[in-house]
Image (cartoon, helix red, strand yellow):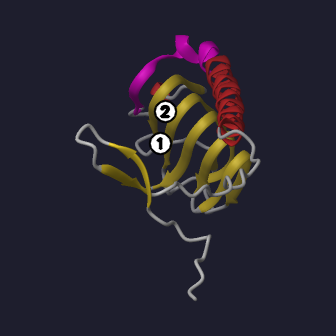
Amino acid sequence: MTSIDTKEAVPMPTLLDHRGIPTWSIPPQIDPPAPVARTAPESAPTEKRRSRGRVAAQVLGVVTLILVVAIVAVALPHLGDGTGDHTDHPRGFDDLESEYSFGIGSLTVDLRDVDFPAGVHTVAVDLGIGSAEIWLPTDVDYQIRGDLDIGNVDVLGNTSDGFGNTVNAARDVGSDATVVLDVEAQIGHAQVRRG
């Protein structure tokens, strides 16, 4: 005798269709429901990333604002000293000024054509924001102090970069004339050369 496995679906006659012929159907098998994994909603990690992004954007905004305020605070007092590109080139000692100031931009002070008489001669160069280039004659003794708040200062090859830079240089070439050069700039680049 053959046994029937009750776990297998066996076609069974059920109803008669409209012509009186039995219809066959397979009883549905019921599977247990699949386990549902409990996880955090998808929006939680995304929301954390968004929150971190907002914080980073706010910090960047505050830092940018501080930098802009600092630059404006440095620039405002110097705006009256001029902006753009400016060159001072005195042709003789009578044309020499004791101070050359410039606000924002590029300043060149060329002292190579000045015939300095015996004695000590102090010249100050002050720049707000930008670059300053100062040229000294080769036939005078010199004492130079280059001071730059933020940026790069180069005094005859002696350089310093970053914040609060000061470079000093002195040389005695046997002249009766000594130029004491004081270069100050707030933000940018200052360079002293001889030629």
Residue 90, given in percent of the width and then of the height, sits at 42, 31
The location of residue 88, given as percent across then percent down, is: 42, 30
Residue 174 image position (x, y, % from top left):
63, 62
**Residue 57 point in image, percent of width and height:** 64, 31
Which residue is more in the foreground, 157 or 20? Answer: 20
The residue at 69%/27% (across/down) is 58
Q: Give the crowd class for mark 2: few <14, some 14-19, many >=20 residues within 10 Å.
A: few
Task: Say which label, 1 or 2, has the lower sequence index.
Answer: 2
As for residue 83 lying within the magenta part, the answer is yes
- Name the residue beneath numbered marker 2: 93
Residue reaching furthest to the top: 80
Quarter-of-image position of residue 183: top right
Q: Is residue 181 visible?
A: no
Q: Are marks 1 and 2 in contact (CB under 8 Å)?
A: yes
Q: Residue at x 56, y 44 (%)?
A: 190
- Classify mark 1: residues with Cα within 10 Å, few (<14), some (14-19) or many (20+): some
The amino acid marked with disc number 1 is: Asp
| Magenta residues (range) | 75-89
Q: As displayed, is residue 32 above or below residue 118?
A: below
Which residue is most to the bottom? 1
Marker disc for residue 55: none
Using the image as rendered, state which of residue 124 and residue 81 is in the foreground: 81
